[in-house]
Amino acid sequence: MPIVAEISRSQRSVHPSDGKSNGVHIFRLGELFCGPGGMALGALNAGVNHDGEQYKIAHAWATDYDSDTCETYIKNICPSSSGTVICRDVRTLDCSILPEIDAFAYGFPCNDFSIVGEKKGVEGKFGPLYQYGVKALNKFKPKFFIAENVGGITSANEGNAFQRIVRELEASGNGYDLSINLYKFEEYGIPQARHRVIIVGMEKRLGRIFKVPRPTTLNHPVSCRVALEQPSIPPNANNQERTAQSKNVVERLKFIRPGENAWNAQLPPHLKLNVKGAKLSQIYKRLDPQKPAYTITGSGGGGTHVYHWEEPRALTNRERARLQTFPDNFEFCGAKESVRKQIGMAVSPKMAEIIFNAALKTMAGIEYPCVPSSLSSQSRLF
């Protein structure tokens, strides 16, 4: 069901445009493909103090096509201003109804760029949707933006798709200096081996260059055991329903040791999978309690739900949310499978907070520990 048809005129200028207002610089954030609010939560948790002035992010508007996702976003991010969340296909979105913004974020759909699938890139159904972010940048000309996608985006269409996207983002709005990096989330304290390309654009005329924050847990990543057990999940936590496992699945999992999957475990013949084609490493893969989790996904059928290292069962949605760094009081709306999809498709809030904090420091002119970009728009690759 639609969440809102349009934003009223009275809601279009809630915060002052970025600029000094009682020592506080507020950057109004707009989002396309907002998901359940992982990016927004990280943005709202970010904040920088410098020379007596504060730099903060404030929600202005967000949009997504899925009603459960939008309800989750409203419930956790902006319960008092639900009218700023629009549930609509981006292809039918009227940007003229949206308030002005100073910052923009979008994790455009990754289906056609994922290493799993046909990798149609910009020739697929979802690949071209990045262009709506370019349109938003051309209309609003925010001071900075953040775009996120899977690592496979760099090789789609033999790399041509990524080069095209980068060129269009760089030339959009008033022009942007881009920082492009493949972030390995486990190197930043996220208890999950999730690797994503994140592009940060700073408006050229500002003379600010975003630098990749230095990893904080490069040699000591947070294990999934620590994430799920320290502290333990409250018994009354939301989204903690367990999946009813079949007798065969329970029996199969008992033969799979931590870190193994259905293909490399020593399974008896009657428990082996009769599947032709690609043998995905995450099928019935049990977590290794001493390591970060493997990538939490939002799609797929049986065998892809992420499995506990000790108990013969799939993780609950709350446990998956923990591995994505959502706090326990973040409540997801919708049926169990809808929630699983929302969690898997979301941006990790903690990773988003790290990126937004670095962006705010860049805007404030604050130096911070950094490393070279792994993918640079200034290189000969582009």
Image: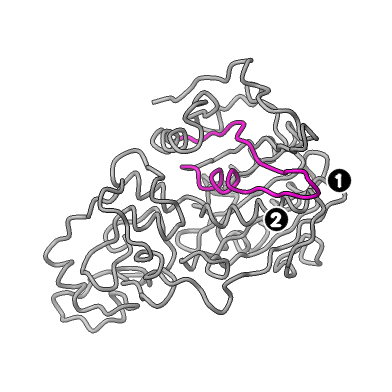
Residue 382, position in %: x, y? 78, 61
Q: Nearest the camera: 118 or 166?
A: 166
Q: Name the amino acid, label 2.
A: Ala
Q: Name the amino acid, label 1.
A: Leu
Residue range in magenta is 36-65
Q: What residue sits 32% from the left and 68% below the top?
A: 283
Kindly indicate the quadrant of the structure image that contains residue 304. bottom left
Residue 284, position in %: x, y? 29, 69
- Against 75, residue 123 (above or below) is below
Q: What residue sits 60% from the left and 35% below the top?
A: 59
Q: Is residue 259 magenta?
A: no
Can residue 231 be seen here? The reply is yes
Instruction: Residue under label 1, please give it.
Output: 206
Colour scheme in use: one colour
Q: What residue sits 68% from the left and 58% below the top?
A: 160
1 or 2: tag closer to the N-terminus: 1
Residue 253: mark in rendering = none
Q: Nearest the camera: 159 or 313?
A: 313
Q: Secondary structure at mark 2?
A: helix
Answer with left or right where residue 61 lies relative to residue 296. Answer: right
Q: Is residue 56 magenta?
A: yes
Can residue 128 be seen here? The reply is no
Residue 161, position in %: x, y? 65, 55
- Against 94, residue 301 (above or below) is below
Answer with left or right where residue 45 lies relative to residue 305. Answer: right
Instruction: Residue under label 2, please give it.
Output: 358
Answer with left or right where residue 225 lies relative to residue 7. Answer: left
Q: What residue sits 61% from the left and 60% below the top?
A: 197
Instruction: Please tell me how many numbered marks the rendered image carries.
Output: 2
Please tell me how crowded label 1 is: few (under 14), some (14-19), or many (20+) other residues with Cα within 10 Å.
few
Answer with left or right where residue 323 lies relative to residue 156. Answer: left
Residue 90, position in %: x, y? 55, 33
